[in-house]
Image (spheres, rainbow, N blue to C red):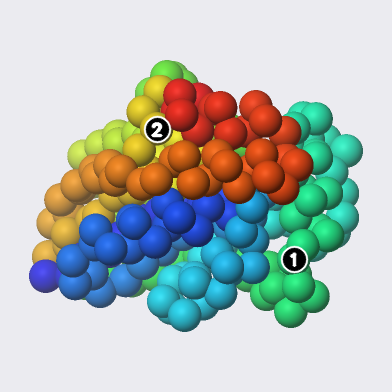
Amino acid sequence: MKSVAIIADIHSNIIALQEVMKSMKNVDHILCAGDLVGYNPWPNESIRFIQEKGIKSIMGNHDAAIVDGSYDTMNPQAKLALQYTHKKISQENIEYLNSISKKLTIQVEDVSLCAYHGSPLSPLRQYVYPWAPRRFLRTLVDMVEGEVLILGHTHIPMIFSFNDKLLINPGSVGQPRDKNPQASYMILQIEGKKINVEHHRVYYNIDVVMSKIIEDGLPIALAHRLKKGI
């Protein structure tokens, strides 16, 4: 049996990321479904942590925005946070973000896992919510050859089973939006073709993150939303 931890949407929240990692027990692989940076105050620290832990990651839309310097499609708060991030992030870490793919596929036991930040239709930008029509979700799953399709971007966890296939979003490590402020991630226990999904929530010191957001002059709304999980 092999275990695969699935995380997503860290958004420069090293405090939450560290607590999530502490809660994991002897996992064989860790995959991140994109958006390492944005919103929160620790882009360099978060990327360094990802690299040190050997976490396989794909590119999210905030990561791509830092690479190409294009923030015009973002909402005002996200744009200000990306401008802050671009001033703070090292050139080495920009190059790292530029090096990661928009898609990742790995084989674990007899199961193939395929990850996108948005969706197979739009790898960076499409939001796929749990309340989307089941027929549409099945269409997305059928677009990939693997048994498991992993998505991020919405910051809302979901698990859908389609007999022979699985669609999951682990929720967000660094900025949950399902009205639960605790960091969210999932672990897949895989044996042969059998897959068991565990959803985990982890408490972290939100007050420390909020204080740093305010201290660094990021939009105060980004601090308050962490407390509410929105």
Q: Nearer the viewer, residue 6 or 44?
A: 44
Residue 6 place in picture, x, y as percent: 36, 56
Residue under the image location 72 percent in, 48 percent down:
216
Residue shown at 34%/56% (left/top)?
A: 19
Residue 201, position as x, y percentages in the image: 28, 42
Q: Tell me if mark 1 has few (under 14), some (14-19) or many (20+) residues whose alpha carbon lies within 10 angstroms of its own.
A: some
Drawn side of residue 76 relative to residue 190, left or right: right
Q: Which mark is residue 62?
A: none
- Local SS, label 1: loop
Is 90 displayed left or right of 174 in the figure?
A: right
- CB under 8 Å between callouts 1 and 2? no
Label 1, label 2: how far apart the Cα atoms are:
26 Å
* Horizontal arrangement in the rendering, residue 55 relative to residue 167 (left or right): right
State which quadrant residue 59 falls in.
bottom right
- Amino acid type indicated by mark 2: Pro
Quadrant including the N terminus? bottom left
Query: Which labelled disc corresponds to residue 89?
Result: 1
Identified by mark 1, the residue type is Ile
Q: Nearer the viewer, residue 91 or 8?
A: 91
Q: Nearer the viewer, residue 43 or 199?
A: 43
> Does the image show residue 218?
yes
At 39% from the left and 32% from the top, the residue drawn is 181
Relative to 183, 177 lies left or right: right
Which residue corresponds to mark 2? 181
Q: Secondary structure at mark 2?
A: loop
Q: Position of residue 99 (x, y in %)?
A: 68, 74
**Which numbered disc flags the more N-terminal residue, 1 or 2?**
1
Residue at horizontal 65 percent and vertical 27 percent from the top: 221
Q: Nearer the viewer, residue 128 or 142?
A: 128
Q: How many marks?
A: 2
Q: Residues within 10 Å of mark 2 (few under 14, many from 20)?
A: many
